[in-house]
Image (cartoon, rainbow, N blue to C red):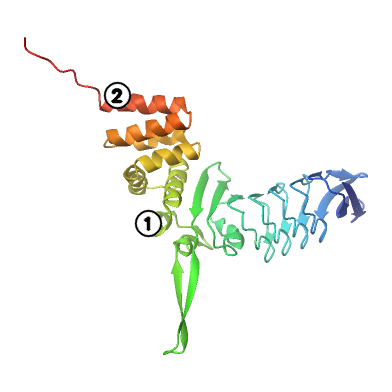
Amino acid sequence: MDLKFEFIDDQTAKLTEVTGEDEVVFIPDMYEGHVVTVVGERTFYGHREIKRVRLPKFLKKIENYAFAECRFLEQMELPECTESVGDYCFYNCIRLVRIDLPETITRMGYGAFKNDTDLVDVHIHVRHGEEHRVNIILDETSFEQTVTFHYEDGQIAQLVFTEFYYEVTANEEARQFNYHTYGTGTLYRNCISGSGIDYMKYDEIFDLTIHRDDPKTIMDLALKRLSYPYELTEKARQKYIAQLKKMGGQTLLYLIETQRWHLFPLLTEGDPLSKDILEQGITYGQQYHIPEFVSVLMQYKNTHYSSMTKSFEL
């Protein structure tokens, strides 16, 4: 792919145009002795063949519509010094699954990720109390998303923001419209304010999630919260574990399907899983050809349900 640049000043340059049909694009850090700091407006607009782009490490600004309509773009990692993302920058990148945002970003443009219906994995580096920066993405989406917060002290929180949708019905007698919200997505999104995330409030909503959301969403949310227990109280922790155990064989199958069987130890606290549930898990493990998981379950089963030897009087 051919790249065209223009000089901004004596030291910096801007990428202004790309031509070609490469699936992977590598933008150099330097161009003719100038540091590449800007990806210009509409530079990649409509390049539907592109799947990956490596951005220059000194990048500071991505201008409006720079990657809009790149419908096969799969993921994007913004360099650590990126400060500004323009309006509609990634608009209609419908196959964009993951975005990594650095702590240095101070501006996120309107509609930057609008219509990115596959964007389910968001990683953002933030300081404590600045988590609201992710709202520019969450406010534009109603589908389920996982946001991983990477804090400056090395701690990590991974939260699922569930799906929601509105239904509008006409009340002709009252000459008005009634709005009904389904799913818990708005409740989880409201846990983020200008002062940060209310983790206690987030965990309290799980009681509603159990009754309103899909079983896979329930299991995924609980497993991610337990895997990254940032500001997780013991009471909330036990609630998540209890629900996973209550879902029994369904949870074991989900661990296999999502290749997270290494999280099985989370289910070993408190009362043991029933023998029937363990046998279901063993069957699933055998069907999916995961001998290491089968071995763990069999060991657990033998520990808690060792066979009794009958004795007979002669």
Determine which quarter of the picture holds residue 180.
bottom left
SS at mark 1?
helix
Q: Is residue 30 left or right of residue 206?
A: right
Q: In the depicted view, which residue is nearer to us: 266 or 275?
A: 275
Residue type of the residue flagged with mark 2: Asn
**Residue sitting at 78 percent across and 50 percent down?**
49
Q: Is residue 9 left or right of residue 100?
A: right
- Packing grade of label 2 (10 A; few <14, some 14-19, many >=20) is few
- Hey, which residue is sitting farthest top in the picture? 314
Q: Is residue 76 visible?
A: yes
Residue type of the residue flagged with mark 1: Glu
Q: Is residue 207 left or right of residue 38?
A: left
Q: Is residue 273 visible?
A: no
Q: Which residue is mark 2?
A: 302
Say above or below: 9 vs 297: below
Q: In the depicted view, which residue is nearer to us: 212 or 15?
A: 212
The label on residue 204 is 1
**Residue sitting at 45 percent across and 69 percent down?**
181
